[in-house]
Amino acid sequence: MRCADYAASGTPDVGANAVKALEGRGAALVAKGLPAGPGGAKGQIVFTAADAVAWTKAGKKVILVREETNPEDVEGMRAAVGILTARGGMTSHAALVARGWGKPCVVGCDAIRIDEKAGTITIGDKTVKVGEYLTIDGATGEVMLGQVSTVAPTISGDFAVLMGWADKVRTLKVRTNA
């Protein structure tokens, strides 16, 4: 579950039933990897950390797509709204950094073929160019073409009541990433 402060980060959840609701939204499930960083992200694809930083400074939301990440990619990972890698597992660099920052991430998506020189990724019989939109669901590992509508997480029921009581008496704001 994500707390209300998570919604303020601008990284909403796609939701557990997102794929069932894709029909009629102009998006298609094209690949699946490992769910490494919960939450949903939609943005234009870029292949380098430098491009992620530059495009973000220009006001664009980007998904950083890499074979795998390394420490040189950290600034681009921070700038991107989501991260997608062709290789890696739940303890890979991309997965650990993304979870630590609360950033949506899908790793080990071996269905994607990245051609940085051509500026494309190929997923099955579909080719996607730099700047085109992808949506990733880091809770399920799903990769979708296009921009899937996302929903900000909400707190409801007994949990909302409990958190309301806590907010009335707390003197310290605690944020966690469990």
Image (spheres, rainbow, N blue to C red):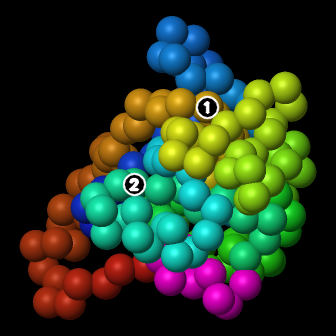
Q: Residues within 10 Å of mark 1 (few under 14, many from 20)?
A: many
Q: Can I make out residue 162 in this image?
A: no
Instruction: Please tell me whether the stretch drawn in magenta is mainly helix, strand or loop.
Output: helix
Magenta span includes 74: yes
Q: How many marks?
A: 2
Marking on residue 17: none
Name the amino acid type tagged 2.
Answer: Lys
- Element type at mark 1: strand
Q: Quadrant of residue 93?
A: bottom right
Residue 34 vs 57, above or below: the answer is: above
Quadrant in the rendering for residue 95:
bottom right
Residue occupied by mark 2: 61
Q: Position of residue 131 (x, y in %)?
A: 51, 46
Is residue 99 toward the left or the right of residue 85 in the image? left
Count neighbours of disc 2 (C-alpha within 10 A) and say few if under 14, some if 14 to 19, many if 20 or more: many
Q: Whole-percent x and y of residue 62? A: 47, 56
Q: Position of residue 114 (x, y in %)?
A: 80, 53
| Residue 124 visible at all | yes
Q: Where is residue 32, by image quadrant?
A: top right
Q: In the current view of this chain or complex, which residue is farthest to the front?
A: 117
- The residue at which mark 1 appears reads as 145
Q: Position of residue 102 (x, y in %)?
A: 49, 70
Q: Is residue 113 above or below residue 166?
A: above
Q: In the figure, is residue 49 to the left or right of 65?
A: left
Dot 2 falls on a residue whose secondary structure is loop
Magenta-tinted stretch: 70-79
**For the point 49% across and 67% down, which residue is it?**
52
Q: Amino acid at mark 1?
A: Leu
In this rendering, the answer to whether 65 lies above or below 153 is below
